[in-house]
Image (cartoon, rainbow, N blue to C red):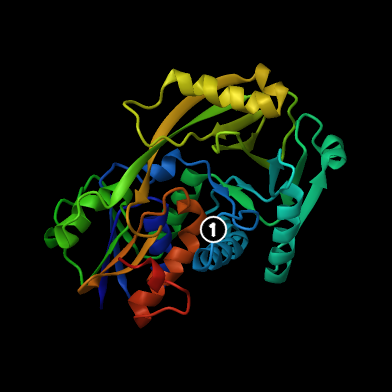
Amino acid sequence: MTTVTIIGCGVIGAMIAYELRNTDLEVTVIEANSQPAMGSTGAALGVLMGACSSKAKGDLVTLRLASLRKYDHLITELTQQTNLDILYNRNGILNLYRSSNAETKARSLIEIRKEQGFELQWLDQNHIREQFPQWHTDGGLMSFCDRAVHPTQLVKALVTAAIADGVKFHWNEPVKNLADISGDRLVITSGLGSNPLISSIIGKSDLLQPVGGQALLVEIPHLNLQTVVHFENEDGSDVNVVPLGGDRYWLGATVEFDYEQLPRQANEKLLLEQAIAWCPLFEKAKILSTWAGDRPRPQGVRAPILGFMPKLPHILIATGHYRNGLMMAPITAQITRDLLLEGDSDLPWQPFCL
């Protein structure tokens, strides 16, 4: 039997293990930490912004939308298999705008997504006042198909289901050298931890750049928000508000390329000020906790990095998703499965190879 060793158990490693669980492959996952999702996955907000995003282009759009299509069935399947709770918001995402040409761009995207099978709706200022009266905006794009998922709950369910079907997991086992790992095939999914493993082969030690991000858990009475809200500030930074139930919300996250230490108190004030500018009710927010993490951002190559290691076809890479690990985990797992079993995939993976 062909053996596959997956290095790293964030959402990408866990999703691949789940995807491979019922194949003829013998699958083992090795994680450096004492439990899964302790890196960038554990610091994420779980916003699955595929249909309403206009930033991604070309093949990346194809992959993001294909991944989004998988989520509803995936969550239903996982909850049935594991009986675990997975906080999964099916109420869509509302993108808020303050721009004179926002409606024109939004309506163009609406038509594009309609042809692709996704429903978007432009809400003018009057509609916003009726449906989301707390928010101050010129208009918004409502995406009924986009989602949000609790990152660590998702990974816990993926691991539980994979274990039940025979996948082996080893915790507290950092990998320092690929030569130390046994297995017919290796899959590197360890985010920033992939740097030393990849550098030993391609000679580039900083392929993945750490980009910091800080977020808050806040309590806001009477906000009564069921939909994920996304808005972009004047400086180009974007913020998500993710409902958790019981007047609690995740707020974030910052994008920091140059920092000495995270989390820091100044970011708490910054995030709240940004939210207050769009929704004055955030003046009453009580900060319950704050945290930070690093996202793996590829340098000099596209994100994410997928496919075979150059000149080493027994080693695959599935990492460097930057801010889209949760978004792209299902389709990354499908591509990896295709490559392991067939050597190719019908999905566009070649543009993302090293």
Give left or right: position of 258 versus 62.
Answer: left
Q: Residue at x 44, y 64 (%)?
A: 332
| Residue at 38% in and 40% down | 211
Which residue occupies the extreme front position in the image?
Answer: 100
Compare residues 77 and 228 and report the one nearer the observer: 228
Which residue is outermost to the bottom? Answer: 342
Residue at 77% in and 29% down: 134
Count the numbered circles shown.
1
Camera-nearest residue between 268 and 6: 268
In percent of width and height, residue 52 lies at: 65, 54
In this rendering, would 6 be left or right of 74?
left
Lateral position of residue 177 relative to residue 30, left or right: left
Residue 333 image position (x, y, % from top left): 43, 65
- Does 298 appear above or below 346? above
261 w.r.t. 51: above or below: above
Which picture quadrant has residue 76? Answer: bottom right
In which quadrant will I find the N terminus?
bottom left
- How far across and down, in percent of the image, does residue 295 sit? 39, 44
Residue 337 higher or lower than 213, as above or below: below
Q: Residue 256 appears in which quarter of the rendering?
A: top left
In the depicted view, which residue is nearer to us: 318 or 169? Answer: 318
Quarter of the image for the C terminus: give it.
Answer: bottom left
**Image quarter for residue 21?**
bottom left
Secondary structure state at the residue bearing disc 1: loop
> How many C-alpha atoms fall within 10 Å of the one at disc 1: few (<14), some, or many (≥20)?
few
State the residue in front, 250 or 15: 250
Q: Residue at x 36, y 79 (%)?
A: 341
Residue 250 is at least partly visible in this image: yes
x, y percent for residue 46: 53, 45
Q: Is residue 23 visible?
A: no
Find disc 1 in the rendering and name its residue. Answer: 56
- The amino acid type, in three-letter code, at marker 1 is Ala
